Amino acid sequence: MDKKLIKNGLVVTKDKDDRKFRNGMIYIEDNIIKFIGPQTEDLLQKYSKGAEVIDAAGKIISPGFISLHSHLYSAVVRSIPFSGFDNADFSFISWMERFWYPMLEDRVTREQMYIGSLANMLGNIRTGITTTTDTAEGSYALPGAMDHVHRAGEESGMRCVLSFETTGRISPENQALGFQENLDFIKKVNHQNGRIKGRIGIHTTFSCPTELLQEARKTSDELGCGIMMHMADDRWHNFDATRKYGKRPTRYLEDIGFLGPDVLLFHCAYMDLLQDPEIFKRHDVKIAHNAESNAIFGFWPDMIPFIKEGVCVGLGTDGQTHSMFEIMRTAQMLHRLKYENLELFPDADVLGMATNKGSEALLMEKEIGSLEVGKKADLIMLKDRSAVPIFEENVENYIVSTCERSDVDTVMIDGKILLKDGEFTEVDEMAIYAKSKEEAIDLWKKNGWPLP
């Protein structure tokens, strides 16, 4: 049995009472938290026997962050030497059709999906993300794409919820391959009760026929696996749905019986704010709010009506950004700017979106998302480099408003330390990045882009 005792830390639990312990300790057996609370000499004596003792003096201990949306392979397409905009007037759907699909998504290889996913996972760990949720793209990397993403998850040590992005935009045959890729992966990993789980991944309402969405719903009910899908990140979702079905996407999805508590929808930037929040609440639909990625593309999502209705809203990276600290701040600023209200998105709530709301969105709130007895030992330790004392009253403000990815000192996932003193303990980070650079250049060559 592996035993670890973390002592002398400022512990932020993010449990239902949002408890904090100024001089706290956490005792872990294998991957499960067995004790958490104020530190005393008697407890130190009790739990230190046979345990690895970790001194967290001067550090803040928090639940690991949970990213609800990503395209992990996109490490190999970040900072590409071509914008994709040309001289054409920009719309997101035209950019996708002129650039993203033909030059990136349709050309990525299985090896690029592996190394890009692994590189992105390391970047996630460096910013304190302990659980990532991925929708793998690569319709011409089928079959077998998910085996390569799975390999990356195993080697990184991350907790992962993985899916393949099934789409009907290419052909019925390719759509069937994508759906089967999800089923094969789910049947391979979900019974193992390990760090990695599978869900059914669907692209969008505009790229998938009704029959596919209904098949996904039926299959999820049978397997108990859950569904993930992009939803109204761009206005095109609404235009397409009203043209085809005479109703906006949410009403369409409700009418075909797609919505449910196991449905996680990414983005939700252009919604019917008069009707959709109530529909989401009625069906207990969850939202992955990708604040920074949306802002980069000029989108202006509004989560306030959904949060007021009681809908579960967590945070995601969308693969375009790493830092959950930046994402928390962006989510906070977007809504305060939109409403001209500085009291919106208080720090405690924003930190909750990155932790316990993330676990709730994945239906994993009994396992992760807060530091409590009986839960998995997924936690991070942050350096305290503040110019003022940090204690119970201001620690959440410090994490949300001040911390950077460079402040992530230690990351533990499933009871295993993967990052210690800012260095990876299990993998050669620089070798992985070097391989990712090689694969990125191969992709750039295919598109005739400038090379280094």
Image: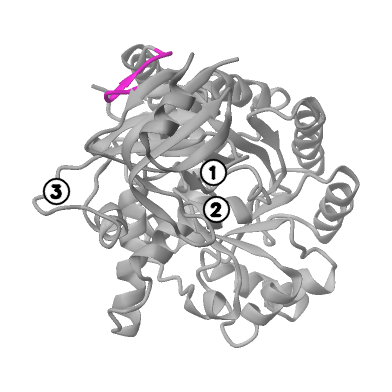
Residue occupying image coordinates x 33% and y 15% = 434
Circle 2 Cα neighbour tier, 10 Å, few/some/many (<14 / 14–19 / ≥20): many
Q: Which of the labelled discs sits on residue 424, or is there none?
A: none
In magenta, the rendered stretch is: 420-427
Q: Is residue 423 magenta?
A: yes
Q: Quadrant of the C terminus?
A: top left
The Cα atoms of the two marked residues, 2 and 3, are separated by 27 Å
Which is in the foreground here, disc 1 or disc 2? 2
Q: Which mark sits nearer the N-terminus, 2 or 3?
A: 2
The residue that mark 2 highlights is 358
Q: Which mark sits nearer the N-terminus, 1 or 3?
A: 1
Amino acid identity at mark 1:
Tyr
The residue that mark 1 highlights is 101
Q: Are marks 2 and 3 in contact (CB under 8 Å)?
A: no
Amino acid identity at mark 3:
Ser
Which is in the foreground here, disc 1 or disc 3? 3
Measured from the top left, where is residue 252 in percent x and y?
76, 73
Secondary structure state at the residue bearing disc 3: loop
Q: Residue 159 lies in what quarter of the image?
A: top right
The residue that mark 3 highlights is 386
Secondary structure mainly formed by the magenta segment: loop
